[in-house]
Amino acid sequence: MAGSNALVEIKKLQKYFSINGGTVKAVDGVDLTIHQGETVGLVGESGCGKSTIGKTAIRLLEATAGEVLFEGKNIFSLSPREMKALRKEVQIIFQDPYASLNPRMTIESIIGEPLDIHQTLKGKARKDRIKELLRLVGLNEDHMQRFPHEFSGGQRQRIGIARALALQPKFIVCDEPISALDVSIQAQVVNLLKELQDRFNLTYLFIAHDLSMVRYISDRILVMYLGQMVELADSDELCKEPLHPYTQALLSAVPTPSPNGRRERIVLEGDVPSPMNPPGGCVFHTRCPQAMDTCRVVKPKWQEVKPAHFVACHLYE
């Protein structure tokens, strides 16, 4: 479970993209604190800004505005040399386990590349570390001289995890690490991530679509819609008592193993608005089954409605 010390603090984060003369507000004012040893799940429909938050939080993308503090230091103000040192502490596991691996490099070269860049280990020590990493993720040293195309999707994602662990980071962004995998493999990868977290006290930002899987791995869950935060709460609390109509709709679509435990399906009308021209007021009002007149003109406040349960919705003002 999460500790009390903040490892990552995201403050008023914005990331806008200029496209065809317009501006896409991919992330528009996100505030989030992630504690050491904690997993925060990040969910929402495609295009809501989940991956953009993850990549901007570790400065793979430059922010439009806001701050990201890692152990109290604003990473956006670091020099290139300081950022290189920070890369040992923060890593990412990418969504596509094939595209993220160089097809011309052996597994030994792929996992060893971070060690080479940071010149941490050489010779036998380097090779031993790669063997150790392969064992940690459920592979063996016989795989070292093979190439990515010789592995299944689940095995390739394990290689990506091994690479992310190479420099012993504290914080890992898991950018939809299971969405490209078969359902039977997804649980194996999530269980592996949990085991590694317990063993090395890792901190995760876990980005995914599958709310049931996010609930399983996460301590808290943040729900995003059109680049903005709509709800944040403890994992079990949010799934048992969702407050925001959007969260309620997302959870109603999650399959349940028991016919008696089935939720009433909430079907949202219309399409997600364009992030180039988001609606005024509450960005969700165009699809919200409980929208009021004030929702169309006044942006709801981000407020703590219950202990550690935050929501941006006029229904609770």
Image: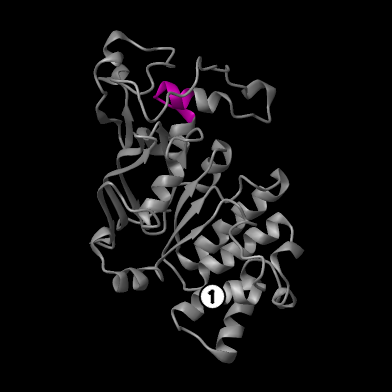
Is 229 situated above or below 41? above
Q: Position of residue 310 (x, y in %)?
A: 32, 33
Q: Is residue 91 left or right of residue 94?
A: left
Q: Residue at x 56, y 88 (%)?
A: 125
Bounds of the magenta span? 240-248
Q: Position of residue 231 (x, y in %)?
A: 37, 32
Q: Position of residue 131 (x, y in %)?
A: 64, 79
Instruction: Give the camera-side residue of 184 and 17.
Output: 17
Q: Residue at x 64, y 47 (%)?
A: 180
Is 170 situated above or below 99? below
Q: For residue 7, which quarter of the picture?
A: bottom left
**Residue picked out by circle 1:** 113
Instruction: Give the camera-side residue of 211 and 259.
Output: 211
Q: Is residue 182 left or right of residue 194?
A: right
Please, which residue is most extreme toward the front here?
A: 21
Instruction: Give the camera-side residue of 103 and 235.
Output: 103
Q: Residue at x 25, y 19 (%)?
A: 317
